[in-house]
Image (cartoon, rainbow, N blue to C red):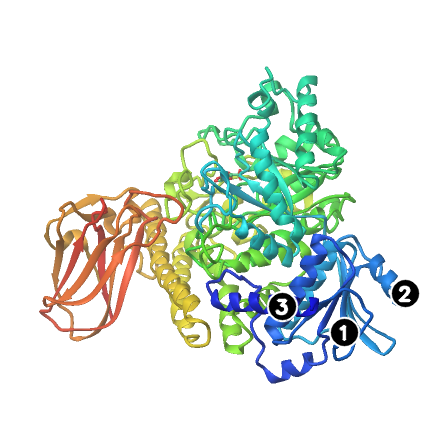
Amino acid sequence: MLYRRAAIMVLLCAIHWIAQAESGSEGWLRYSRITNPGAIRQYQSLPHRIVQTGTSAMAQSASTELARGLYSMLGEDIQQAPSLSGDHGLSGADAFVLGTNDELHHLLPRWTPQPLKAEGFSVSRFKDGGNNYWIIAGGSPRGELYGVFHLLEQVAEEHALAPDTESPSSPIRWVDQWDNFDGSIERGYAGRSIFFDGGHVRSDLSRVSEYARLLASIGINGCDVNNVNSDLRTLQPDMLRELARIADAMRPWGVRLALSVDLSSPQIVGHLPTFAPLDPTVIDWWQQKTDEIYSLIPDLAGYVVKADSEGRLGPSKYGRNPAQAANALAHALQSHHGLVLYRGFVYNQHLDWRDPKADRARAGYDNFHSLDGTFAPNVVIQVKHGPIDFQVREPVSPLFTALQHTSQAVELQVSQQYTGQQRHMVFLVPMLKAALDTDLRAQNRTTPVKEIVEGKSFHQPLGGFVGVANVGLDANWLHHPMAMANLYGFGKLAWNPDLTTDQIIDSWTRLTFGNNPRVVSTIDDLQRNSWHAYEQYTGPLGVGTLTDIIGIHYGPGIESAERNGWGQWIRAAHRGIGMDRTIATGTGYIGQYPPELAKVYESLATCPDELLLFMHHVPYAYVLHSGKTVIQHVYDSHYAGAATAATYASRWQRLHGLIDEERYQQTLALFQYQAGHAIVWRDAVSEWFLRMSGIPDAAGRVGHFPDRIEAESMQSDGYTPVDVTPWETASGGKAVVCNRISACTLAQVFNKPAGAYTIAVQYFDLRIGAAQFELLLNGKPIAHWTADDTLPPAVVDRRIDGHTSTRFTLPGVKLAPGDTLTLRGIPDGGEPAPVDYIEITK
Ligand code: GCV
């Protein structure tokens, strides 16, 4: 009876999954039915019974997940049995047997366990008394859960099941969410928070449980749910009780809650006259507050601290240093086995841009290196992988080698803050791997970042990986169907940073879109090169993402980097460009690296091209190792990157019918958008460099657009020209807007030879309204669309600029000389149907 109930429940769940099919909500845990006969055959002998030896919530999750996955993929009734004994009317007593090593050894004394680390697992086969067992053993229930996900992944990828033993690279494998209590997410691009709304924890936390399940499946064991720019209500008693519900929702999946705390809390929440870290009343306050938290959340993973950074208060107010602040918290957490992840992202955003020696990149090292060895054992310094801030290309932070007696975790970004905000496909794993594999050559030996944070290089007990994920309420978590590869890849690298890019993308694609070879090779190829292409059209040679750095970090905004205190300067002048960070003549930043690596970066002869402008200021005519000048490289790479982005949609279209329509159409629309926005980027950066350097493009492309008709030069009825800021984000620096309530029109007589043409309309799509556009040929409508995309993705922005510029493309239009093309724009909700230009190409 018990078994039947379990089977029925699995069935009901399965029906529910089918009904929800392919919104992307299942991520890589789709468990779609295996139809390949060869694969079905190899799984035929698998047991139909699961025996669970443990009773914890995690153990229950493990067996339920195994039943769910196997039922869904193989269509077999999987029954969950309480013990090995008794035939219960079943055909044979073969079973999957799940438990920790100790539990299993008790049940099967003749089975020899593999020694396992706490979060490790082993999958093995064992024959006993004529019965065949697949044993999934964990060093703990969490390890057991990881073993189940591992086995299910093998089946989903149609691999032969084989014995295996694995354990994670390091103890800290966390994600950070930058969610605010009002439900917004800082640098989140996929809808509102799954955790919070209206100042409270959501009443329905079902998405939180689903998220924890996804995280567990890739080995993530901690989640800091509230923004590092922490709300001062976080530590108030009412809020803590609410936050405890999130911990409860994640606990069955082995994901522990962590909290971002603000160091001024003793003063603001505790009403003390001070928050000075060494003040005894403050130390006492943290202890009591921490005890209170653990009474509500006994397995809290710890605190995450952003202090003395971007306006957050910190120990500097009292002349104290980060170690003194971190240790005060560490002391309070010690008896609860909690950790402090103190962020190395401490810098002054009011730098003097006129000072040639000022350099934000130096800040991490300068603020922390002298503190090495003074942190309490349960403090971990969380270091962004680059010294600036998640740019499309950065060297790795020299802080990693400055801390040799301190545990460290690397902070990586899954949320594509500076890399297309989940409107552009940018598969970040190659970038993450480039950072993790960088050998810093500390002590003149091999010390790659991954081994430093694993604690291997300098023999540290703690360490690991933190990914800023920022999933949201969008059904598919991250908005772009391709973006989930970044979350999956982050988790896989945190588990095993030696995995290759190809291994990761291949598994993700199979799990997410199925095993059809054409689907797999097409998606793998699209993803594999996408970071390189994005770098090509947004910021090559290590110059940084040339975006609006004091705004939303999305579209082009080149000069926003210059002449302000934020220190993301590119130091562009009429003769040359780049930050001189050399020891000899620059800011001295390069001297923060161990000598072997510093030597490579210091010399122009050995500095890699891709980091040239991060390390050196050079003339535009400087010749790269590739043989090209810097300026020609900028032009060529922008054209090459945009050309690659233009191929995505047509390559994707070859998959029509091979994957579900919903995700197919959603991805296609995003690829079409990306092609247009890559042109916005290409033109903005190239034109800006042309104006700055005065050196023309040897290939004659930049500044010459023979197929383009500027909107402001078309015959207008109602449209008026406006200047666009920054100028480089609109063709010719101008657009037109319709300030009427009714429609405005632009018209142009076609005067090229007859033929089939592609018509592209470059316009601006603001969030405030949904303007309508209609294209007419000789008065007859040939296309109609609505400007209702959510661009720029994160915020409501009224500006006509490189964030909102987008493109509508109509291929195959037959045109003859004398034809009249008319574009009609109908404003809506304050959106004045803005247009930049029309381009008519063969
Ligand atoms: C959460 C960057 C982002 C900020 C972010 C900060 C950080 O500067 O633009 O939004 O704040 O990094 O990592 O603390």
- First in residue order: circle 3 vs circle 2: 3
Q: Name the element at disc 1.
A: loop
Q: Name the residue at 39% across, 43% down.
A: 548
Q: Name the residue at 25% across, 54% down.
A: 763
Disc sitting over residue 109 in the figure: 2
- First in residue order: circle 1 vs circle 3: 3
Please say if 546 is above or below 670: above
Residue ranking furthest to the front: 1
Disc sitting over residue 647 in the figure: none
Spatial CA distance of label 1 from label 3 is: 23 Å
Spatial CA distance of label 1 from label 2 is: 23 Å
- What amino acid is labelled 1 in the image? His
Label 2 environment density (alpha carbons within 10 Å; few <14, some 14–19, many ≥20): few
Spatial CA distance of label 3 from label 2 is: 29 Å
Q: Closer to us: mark 1 or mark 3?
A: 1
Q: Name the element at disc 2.
A: loop
Q: Which one is nearer the viewer's eye here, 134 or 414?
A: 134
Residue that badge 1 annotates: 88
Kindly indicate whether the residue at mark 2 contacts the one at mark 1 (C-beta within 8 angstroms): no
Quadrant where the N terminus sits is bottom right
For residue 153, say whether it is visible: no
Residue that badge 3 annotates: 69
Q: Residue 611: horizontal and vertical position, in percent?
A: 53, 49
